[in-house]
Amino acid sequence: MLNTKDIMETITMIQEDHLDIRTITMGISLLDCCDSNIDRACEKIYDKLCCRAGELVKTGEEIEKKYGIPIVNKRVSVTPVALLLAASGGDPVKYATALDRAASSIGVNFIGGYSALVQKGFASGDRELIASIPEALSETELVCSSVNVGSTKAGINMDAVKMMGGIVKETALLTKDRNCIGAAKLVVFCNAPEDNPFMAGAFHGIGEPDCVLNVGVSGPGVVRAALEKMPEDASLSQVADLIKKTAFKITRMGQLVGSEASSRLGVPFGIIDLSLAPTPAVGDSVAYILEEIGLEQCGAHGTTAALAMLNDAVKKGGVMASSTVGGLSGAFIPVSEDAGMIEAARSGSLSIEKLEAMTAVCSVGLDMIVIPGDTSPETIAAIIADEAAIGMVNSKTTAVRVIPAIGRGEGDTLDFGGLLGSGPVMSVNKKSPAVMINRGGRIPAPMQSLKN
């Protein structure tokens, strides 16, 4: 039976606490679009995407009206394009252009999958695709790109890490007239999941169905509002319990929307990614949750412990609400997208080094961090290597999405607008890691990889 209190609580969550569905993302396999002729392959891709995802945006808008719950983004993810390039050869940017054209026709916010998986080495098409990323992201509006350079099973491909240091820098350079936006659409992974609905890291894994619908929920403002009502003498056990209960409610909303969209579109329901993904809106911040737990400001000593508890409680609450939890799941800490993180970075309370420590216990990694434009490719590669090592050793997904602010230095601000927000340029250790990065080779997989 419907409970009036529950109905009013949900309305409050939506209207005042920024509860929303962050994304519904349709994953589409492009393996049947492979062709030895790249132009024919691109036409097949365009036709399939328009056919399978043509009703995605309309369906999302209808569900928004029916339930009154905002669905912030409608997105598509596709098979890693490097696999198609291996079959066709040719200029990889043609694939990016075809994806962008299809995404524009469908009306989605982003399309992900301009990707390569090179954790154990380069296969045919991988190097060519990676080398094309700067041009592809500078010539398209909606395409997002990702590269997986390591895993717990394979170790870390340091040749790929070195390459990505230069690719990130070049991508920022080619889009410097648009606030280096290209680098904000590029992420480097370790242990990349194949069912991630969040950009820029979404791609449709080869173990996935031909077409599937994944949902990413949000809701840090809801958790913060719940904690705000707790007395200061409440124990951390009570805090964790409240977070679990709140995460359960948020995930149930995602389950409802995902099931409805799946049924309407005639597409299998994949997973709910129950991550607390912040937005630039005031109050919708993971940093503010940590401060409600009892920190004067995010970045203070105790931040990593508080984030670990938050991440764990979110997962425990979410898995009780849905049997199909996947993706990244936990708490995101993208600096430019989180008002509290931005404040902490500007005040000096939050550094890249502290963020790196926090990534050991949260759901992803160093995300949406603006760094000085003169940061060397070797330093960017070393940042990627550090984060990949955390993921590899801890058997978890980690990622790096840093944006070199070309022509700007520490203390300046880079504004991307919209969901990507704005971020202060954060200081980077200026000691050179060049000798290590230029060694190349592979960091071997850790002992915990030997589980068979």
Image (cartoon, rainbow, N blue to C red):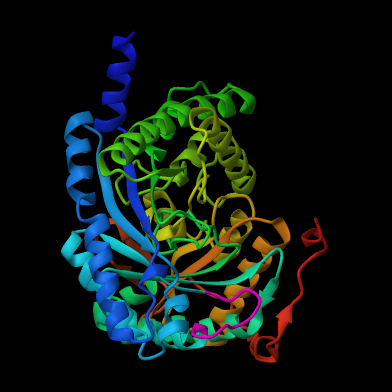
From the viewer's side, name the closer residue of 193 and 383: 193
From the viewer's side, name the closer residue of 392 and 176: 392
Note whether residue 421 is visible: no
Q: Residue at image x 57%, y 24%?
A: 241
Task: Tell me where residue 365 sits by quadrant.
Answer: bottom right
| Percent position of residue 266, x then y | 30, 43
* Residue 119 magenta-highlighted: yes
* Residue 109 magenta-highlighted: no
Magenta residues span 117-126
Magenta span dominant secondary structure: loop
With 18 as the anchor, is 241 left or right in this view?
A: right
Note whether residue 134 is visible: yes
With 384 as the anchor, is 439 left or right in this view?
A: right
Which quadrant is home to the C terminus? bottom right
| Percent position of residue 378, x then y | 57, 86
Task: Tell me where residue 391 sits by quadrant.
Answer: bottom right
| Above or below, comparing residue 47 to residue 254 in the picture | below
With 266 as the anchor, is 277 left or right in this view?
A: right
Which quadrant is home to the N terminus? top left
Q: Residue at image x 38%, y 86%?
A: 36
| Percent position of residue 290, x then y | 51, 41
| Percent position of residue 93, x then y | 33, 84
With 167 as the anchor, is 172 left or right in this view?
A: left
Q: Residue at image x 33%, y 87%?
A: 37
| Above or below, comparing residue 444 to residue 190 in the picture | below
From the viewer's side, name the closer residue of 73 and 101: 101
From the viewer's side, name the closer residue of 375 and 219: 219
Task: Tell me where residue 316 sits by quadrant.
Answer: top right
